[in-house]
Amino acid sequence: MTTAQDQIRAELKRLSNQGVNLFNAMQVEQFPENMESHFTQVLKKDYQAFLKTLPVFAQEYQIWYSAAQAVIRQFLPGRLQDFINLYEQPKGRKEIRSDNYVIEDYLKKVIITTGFDKKIVASPPDAIAVFQQQVNILNAVFDRLDNSLFEIRQVLQAELLDQELQVARQLAKGQFIRSAGALCGVILEKHFNELCHVHHIKVSKKNMLIKDYNELLKKHEVYAFETWRFIQYLGELWELSCRNKKEMPTAEEINDLINGTEKFIKTVF
């Protein structure tokens, strides 16, 4: 059976390979003669066949960047800003130099010269090392996944929440509707706290409710609008279960809350 971690690894591998292809495409664009010489004389490979495997950097980079950024935001949030800074033009940058040249400059084919002889001080080849750093940050996610302490924490958390979900189902089956709803709220709160821990999000407000966590995690782009709206619905069901003294949730509504809680804790991390 394919696990969630296996799926993540497969996606990481795909993005990593795509990054290598984009890196090679950059080198071909900037140093075609050197690359051809290396392939034909050193590697003894078919250079023309190799060229056919490469993407056009300007066409494929943004797709790769968006996907890689999402992965890093999810699993290595502490390096996300570093990753973004390698792409975006620095705010307040007064001059473009080789040491502050970024991918956005590369895509615009920016060339900076100085003096009467038009000596080049910054140009597209400077972005090759910059992109290599982006690929390195993405590849660091593999180490994050391999960290045994991280895995143990996640496994124990998942097992604990699974057990509590089973209790919630038993409560609902026994017609203890409000108790089942209250337990779902506890499960969601634990998972929210874990998400905040993993993504380095500070929770300053005491007595956070589901809607408070939902707004906080959406603000930090941990998940998209669709998930935010889904959690909003779960929060409404929880409110009905625990805070609305005049109306009792139906068995169907409490099952929606339990199933929705299970879906959330097993798909958002």
Image (spheres, rainbow, N blue to C red):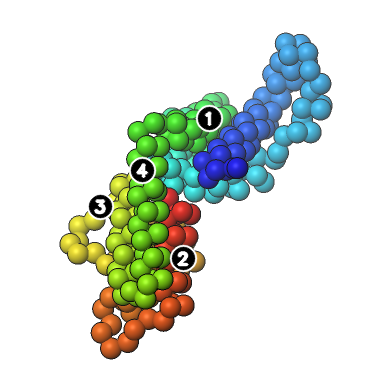
The residue to which callout 4 is attached is 156
| In the foreground, 137 or 229 | 229
Pinpoint residue 205: horizontal percent, then vertical percent.
Answer: 19, 61
| In the foreground, 171 or 250 | 171
Nearer the N terminus, badge 1 or badge 2?
A: 1
Classify residue 53 as left or right of residue 251: right
Pinpoint residue 144: horizontal percent, then vertical percent.
Answer: 42, 34
Separation of marks 3 and 2 at Cα, in angstroms: 28 Å
Residue type, label 2:
Asn
User: Callout 1: helix, strand or loop?
Assistant: helix
Residue at point 77% right, 30% down? 51
Q: Vertically, is 67 above or below 133?
A: below
Residue type, label 3:
Lys
The residue to which callout 2 is attached is 259
Classify residue 3 as left or right of residue 164: right
Pinpoint residue 163: horizontal percent, then vertical percent.
Answer: 37, 54
User: Callout 3: helix, strand or loop?
Assistant: loop
Residue at point 35% right, 50% down? 160
The residue to which callout 1 is attached is 132
Which one is closest to the eye, mark 4 or mark 1?
4
| In the foreground, 211 or 5 | 5
Separation of marks 1 and 2 at Cα, in angstroms: 43 Å
Q: Which mark is residue 202?
A: 3
